[in-house]
Amino acid sequence: MNEIFIGIDLGGTNIKVGCFDSDIKLICKTATPTHADMGPEAVTDKMAQTAEKLLADAGLSLQDVPSVGLGSPGPAIYSEGIIESATNLPKFKNTPFRDMLSERLGKPVVFENDANVACWGEYAVGAGKDVEDMVFFTLGTGIGGGIINNGKLVHGCDDNAAELGHIIIYPDGRLCNCGQKGCVEAYASANATAKRAAEAIEAGAQSSLKKVLDEKGEITCKDVYQHLKAGDKLAKQITDETAEALALVCINMLHTTEPKRIVFAGGMIAAGDILLNRIKDYFNEHIWSLRKEPVEICFATLGEDAGIIGAAALAKQAHDEGKFNSG
Amino acid sequence: MNEIFIGIDLGGTNIKVGCFDSDIKLICKTATPTHADMGPEAVTDKMAQTAEKLLADAGLSLQDVPSVGLGSPGPAIYSEGIIESATNLPKFKNTPFRDMLSERLGKPVVFENDANVACWGEYAVGAGKDVEDMVFFTLGTGIGGGIINNGKLVHGCDDNAAELGHIIIYPDGRLCNCGQKGCVEAYASANATAKRAAEAIEAGAQSSLKKVLDEKGEITCKDVYQHLKAGDKLAKQITDETAEALALVCINMLHTTEPKRIVFAGGMIAAGDILLNRIKDYFNEHIWSLRKEPVEICFATLGEDAGIIGAAALAKQAHDEGKFNSG
């Protein structure tokens, strides 16, 4: 009988669930609203029901599922499966979330930070599938990160490693939501990129984006890249600043865990090669001259399914390594 | 029969050799000039002879030595035991150094970067002996680094991980010897600290260090800390800048591999608590407010023996793990 692995990607807005074969090929997937305000038991039940229905609709059985992977926003004590508190899951307080889902489904559950799950997905079957050392950034509202060292996720002493958006690149620079100044997230997240454009226009910069700001009352990162492609000078400057910030953090990661590949994911990579090439340009401009570095900088390949793919791949790995046998 | 592990710390100036018991307690040690200009075969022979004599003088036998650890400056292909080229070992070109020593002594040899060796020494029996996640900095002529993640040294994709002195903290800042601008090494190494003091005096700053500069023609890092302790204001400002640079890199490492402990070593830690407390002050000033971080910042405890201790500890670990059995 073929083994089926379930990957669940829990977000503040939606729960995504996917069923995968033992090669982590997608069989079927679905999504449903989270309704986090209903509290942890209702969310657990929703995840389980969604998974059960997905399996049934595809003619599959829960009996063929050895393990389930769950990616969740933090902060959490991932090694113990407990959500202490999470910004997007307000009713979760010291919730033993992994064990709740495990008991509800009667299956062992691997519980992991959402950025780490997406990182693992890219490592297992995506942009990093042929390397053993990888660094991963998600460029969204904020910047999340993941580090693979010698084929393993780096968790750190307290499950909070790879908060790569909060690497300080410009001391005394822009204030970040975390309270630090000059974090890469304060410059190069999708939100920060859009915000810098709006600030520049408000400060008097000439740009075709001004009309967008006047009409919509805001600028999105997507607007910036659309106007960049149309030749707007401010959009180019804003993109350059984003790319330079990302290049600096690439250099710092190179000198830290020395990845073979650095993978960028998230909505912002829709900007395409214009952004990627500028990151590489700045990397080459700022990197040392001691040796030619073998690191490759690229974009993720799994898109929005990275979370469910990574969760399923982690479930399979833990099963294959016999992690559930000892309790 | 008790096992004896030999640790060798190869420097451009001296070769240090130590014999250790299986608890990595020092039995005896010695040092001899490297004479790197004699070339790799002569240096190999010198290391072997020194180790053999050290054992004989202590009434020990090479027969009781299961393995030898060798720490060496790089860059090198450590996994293959080859020194491609090393600044301080000019006649070494694509030298299969590990195998040369192994054949000469008839013992398996573990070969590792000198900063990693010292890091492993502190991890095994020094300032990091009770943690599994550690980051290590040597503050000397330059700044070297080592990272322990989950009880293992981080090597990276190409054996050049943990070049922590070249983390960029001030983009477009001081030019580093590596060709980058704003590396922490360009601010906080012993050399950079002394150089910043001399530059400030040459630019007109008032300081009791001016007399030193006038008389000796140079200022050392030791001078800076002596004058700091005597109350000199410029020495305090220079020390503060060093401490702030180190604090920033501590924050960045916290958000990367999340060590439980960050250990500073090297001649500069002779500055004592004045320096350590300023690093902690700046860390607390710049760190995020999202959570209280459990990281501990401290000084190394093994002093100049860290290299031979770490090399012996690596030799023992590889022996215990059966790494030499597969050839």
Image: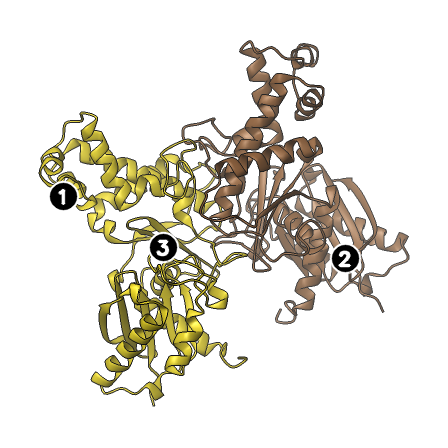
Chain colours: A yellow, B brown
Residue B24, picture quadrant: bottom right
3 or 1: mark nearer the eye: 3
Left or right of A95? Residue B268 is right
Q: Is residue A81 above or below residue B244?
A: below
Distance from disc 2 to disc 1, alpha carbons, whole Å, reads 62 Å
| Same-subunit check for callouts 3 and 1 | yes
Q: Amino acid at mark 3?
A: Thr
Q: Of residues A103 and B251, which is closer to you in this image?
A: A103
Q: Label for residue B81?
A: none
Q: Which residue, given by chain and number where applicable, does mark 3 sit on?
A: A87
Give the CA separation, mark 3 to mark 1: 31 Å
Question: Left or right: A55 with respect to B305?
Answer: left
Under circle 2, the secondary element is loop
Image point 17% across, 40% down: which residue? Answer: A218
Looking at the rendered structure, whether the residues under marks 3 and 2 are on a common chain is answered as no
Answer whether residue B142 is visible to the viewer in this image. no
| Residue pointed to by mark 2 | B24
Sort mark 3 into few (<14), some (14-19) or many (20+) by Cα contacts within 10 Å: few
From the viewer's side, name the closer residue of B237 and B5.
B237
SS for dot 1: helix
Graded by Cα atoms within 10 Å as few (under 14), some (14 to 19) or many (20 or more), the crowding at tag 2 reads many
Between circles 3 and 2, the one closer to the viewer is: 3
Between A243 and A200, the one nearer to me in the picture = A200
Q: What residue is shown at x 82% (from left), y 48% (from top)? A: B29
> Which of the two labelled residues, at mark 3 and mark 1, occupies the earlier sequence position?
3
Q: Of the numbered discs in the image, which one, if any, rests on residue A226?
A: 1
Image mark 1: chain: A
Q: Is residue A258 left or right of residue B82?
A: left
Residue A285 vertical placement versus A78 (above, below) = above
Q: Amino acid at mark 2?
A: Ile
Q: Position of residue A22 (x, y in %)?
A: 34, 79
Q: Position of residue A181 (x, y in %)?
A: 41, 36
